[in-house]
Every structure is written in C-alpha cells, then in structure tokens.
Image (cartoon, rainbow, N blue to C red):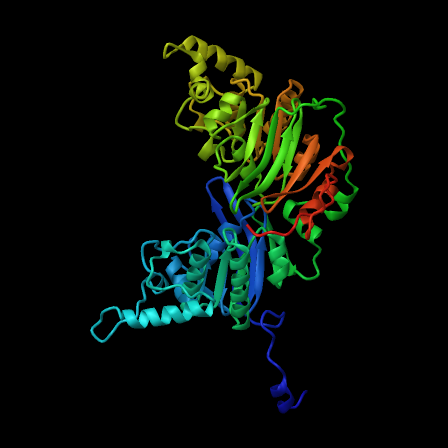
Amino acid sequence: MAPPEAAAAAPPPRPGSPTAPAVLEALGVGKRFPGVVALDDVSLTLRRGEIHALVGENGAGKSTLIKVLTGVHRPDSGELRLDGEPVAFARPVDAQQAGVTTIYQEVNLVPLMSVARNIFLGREPKNRFGLIDFPRMHREAAALMAGFGVTADVRRPLDSLGVGTQQMVALARAVSVRAKVVVMDEPTSALEPREVETLFRVVEDLHSRDIAILYVSHRIEELYRICDRVTVLRDGRLVHTGDLAGLERMQLVAMMLGREVAEVRRHGRTSFGDAHRPDREPVLTAEGLTRRHVLEDVSLELHPGEVLGLGGLLGSGRSETAKALAGALPLDSGSVTVAGRRLGRPSPAAAIRAGVSLLPEDRKAEGVIPGLSVRENIVLAAMPRLSRAGVVSRARQDRVVDVFMKRLRIKASSPEQKVGELSGGNQQKVLLARWLCLEPKVLLLDEPTRGIDVGAKAEVQALVDELAQEGIAVLLISSDIEELVEGADRLVVLRSGAVAGELTGEQVGEGELLEVLAAHGPAAQDSSGTGEEEERDD
C-alpha cells in the first residue's frame, strides 16, 4: 500500500478524464409516446468537466433524451442520478435549481426585456426594501457578459442585439445559476464564424471550471475540435459511447446511419440499366441558392426521366434545398429555372404553375389535412383545373380521384374516408396523388418512405421508378443510405448547407457517399465527389 503522503500527493483527475466523477447519469432510460418508442434502454454518463457530444440523425432520440435530462419529460423506465444520487425532475425549473441548464438552438428568452433582466429572470437581486436592485443587477450582468467577451449595454432590450449576442446571454444565464451541467442544443446553428470562436472560448472556460457540457451538433468538425467523448443514438437506442479522438469520422457517420464501414466499402452500385437515362437538356436548373445560415451557393440540375438523390446528414440543408426549389424558402440570392423559364419571384404558387411539386418531409404538419376526406385531400391542389366559371364539378373530381386511387392502390373504405384514419403509407400515397394529378415536370420527394411499413415502402419506391420512366424529373431525399444509393442515378451531397460533392455512374455507392459525408477541409473543385468543401460556419 502506498504511504499516506504519496496518496496525498497524487494529482486530482483531469476534468473530463475517465477517472473524473460522474455528475449526471441516465441509466437504462426508456420513454414512449403513443405509437412510438422514443428511447429504449438508453444510458449516458456525463463526467465532471467533460465536453460530451450527443449525435444521431432525425428521429434518433436526441431531443427526447435532452428533455428527460432537463425535466421536460419524466422517463417511463430507468433512472437519473445527479452526483451519484437518484433524482427525479418534475419540471425544468427543478433541473435548473439542481444545476442542469439548457441552451437551446432557438434562444428561449424574453425579447422585449433587457439583457440583465433576462439573465436574472426569476431571481433578481433585491434591496433592503424588497425591490429589485437594478444597479447591482446591471453590474453583475455586465461582469458576466464581459467574461464572455461581450461589451453590449445590459440595459438594452434583448431583441436589439444580434443572434450571437443573444446566445451569449442565454449562456450567461445558464452559468449564473451555478450550473453543474450545461446542455447545448445546436448552439452554433445561427452564429457567424467570429461568434462561433467566442462560443468555443466560453466552452473551454466552462470545461476548465469542471462544468460538464452535453454538446448536441450535426457539425462533425465542431465535435472533433472541442469534444472529449461521443454518444451515438439511432432509432431511440444507444449505438456507441466512447472517446472521440480514436474514432474515425467515417466510423462515426456510419454508426449514425446504421451501416458497417467494412460493409459499405465493399458495397457496389446497383445498376438500373437505361431506365433513367437523362435527356441532355435539364428541366430544372438551380444556380447559387443562398440563404444566410441555411444554404450557401447550392447549384444543381434535374433532367427529365432522372432520379437525382440529395444526400447529407441531418442539418446539411437537404429539406431547405427542396423548399427553395419549390418556392417555399425565401432566398437571399440565386435562381431557379424550369423548362427554360426563370421563376421571377419564387413562391409555391409560381413553382406549381411551372410544374414543380414538393412532397414535404413532415406529411402531417405540412402535407395532408387529417380532418378532410381522401377525395378532398387529393383534389386540393387541382381545384383551379377542375372548376369552370368558379364552379367545381363533383363529377370531374370523382374521375380524378378514382384514377389515382386505383393507380396508387390507395387503401381506404371510400374516397370520403378521412385521411387521418389511414395508415402512414396510404397518407403518403394520397399526397403523391395530389401532386401527380397536376401532371408535374419535377417532383421533389423529401423522405417519401419515412414512417411507413415495409410493404408500402416498396410500393412507393416502385412508383418513383415508374414516374421517372414516364419522364418526370425526381429529386429524392432520404436518410436511408441504401434507399438513396439504390434509387438514384446521380447523387449531390450537401454538408453544412453547401454542395460537398457529386457522385455519378459507378461512383454512386454507399462507401463513396460516406467518404464525402465524413470528409473535412478545403474542397477540391471537381465533380468526382472525392473533394471536400472549404470549412464554413453558417
């Protein structure tokens, strides 16, 4: 046994090291919602002074886990421990009082209140008369903000400041409550590069003060720059926890997408022969699509009879690109041309008139209207075509609905059944029918098989192939890497809102796609798909 003086001389564990004590733990946590298992036996340990990355694609369970850790949701199974003791947070305020705070992607403070009031909201310093001590509050708020490199007047309303400064105010509030754990949910999504550097300096300061940080981001560059360990979730389950330094980027991406690196490196391109051979002239051309913090100079072409896959991780700008093409996302610059005619002022109505239809990712929030019938949902977009002198012919409606219910094999008791009563796959087919009855030139499909059963998924995939054979240009977005590779003739890969590469012909394979997704550093200006884009923060 070592002598007592030797034990006393041993240095304390480095913050975030494997021997550092656990601060916040989730042990075997499960959470269910109606029809959905959001978390299934998930465990996570945050150590003192650790910067721990939490990653996963859309629907992986990240948001639910954060809400369990911060008192928004109570777990259905498992337990939480804070400093080794079991704890149950009934409300977010309970978690905050215990030292677990959250910085959300969208600043959740009070815009019309001053910076100082936001920092001390609910715990304002009082004078001897029991009134708010404004001079003291302003002094302390200014000192906190100065520690973050911000010199803004703390008496100004929050909404008069930039987004980056507002994020710093949110962080100052979190730290001022003597936090033990700070959860950061996509904190750099709306920051400028200079503001990102300031945030990272603050993160390092918190790290040095033994505060544990759970860092949620889809930007792999950020994770490898500042994080010690990583936890990967997929479909509500724990996939991996370990040190980030020894984990290859491709391995991390593969785990997020549910693929084995060795498998995707062996996987070859599935050939579809001449089924989707594109014409020479594009039917849609997008040039330099740019929106601050969302898209940066995205350009692509779509040809008649082609299925163009749009690849990328969560937050890469896939859905935003589709919405921009459909006129549903205002742009700072860039243009969209359809069949040789440039869309003047992009809008959904202008895009639809030009022959561009979008099947959105969230069919419940942005697609079907559950309370309306199958018939009403299908003919909704085609009403102007089906009316004469402002009168809609019911007979013409019925003919259109009958044609597409048969063609798409929509299973419903009758055209008058409410769409909300149908399965997810049949709801998706109803949405497809709505846009197909407009005879579009371009069909933008954002996650068309998400949330539907295997049989319906195969039917939708076969339909996409059939539509391309009929000459419709199809843009396919899917988080399922196998579906994307096997269903597309060509792939444009996005990363951080910009084009990271393009894969064509024999290059369209799972291994090649993963290489582009995991790449980092300056981008080579070529179409091989092996180059990398210049690192950017949006």
Horizontal and vertical percent position of residue 239: 63, 52
Horizontal and vertical percent position of residue 308: 65, 31
- Residue 413 vs 137, above or below: the answer is above
Q: How many marks?
A: 0
Horizontal and vertical percent position of residue 332: 50, 40
The quadrant where residue 42 appears? bottom right
In the rendered image, is residue 411 in sight?
Answer: no
- Picture quarter with the N terminus: bottom right
> Could you say which is closer to the camera, residue 353 or residue 459?
353
Q: Residue at coordinates 25% horizontally, 74% vertically from top-left?
A: 127
Outermost residue, left direction?
Answer: 129
- Residue 262 vs 409, above or below: the answer is below
- Residue 143 vs 171, above or below: the answer is below
Describe residue 147's horizontal placement relative to residue 268 as left or right: left
The quadrant where residue 21 appears? bottom right
> Could you say which is closer to the camera, residue 383 or residue 141?
141
Describe residue 430's horizontal placement relative to residue 300 as left or right: left
Horizontal and vertical percent position of residue 384: 43, 16
Q: Residue at coordinates 69% horizontally, 51% vertically from top-left?
A: 522
In the rendered image, is residue 2 in sight?
Answer: yes
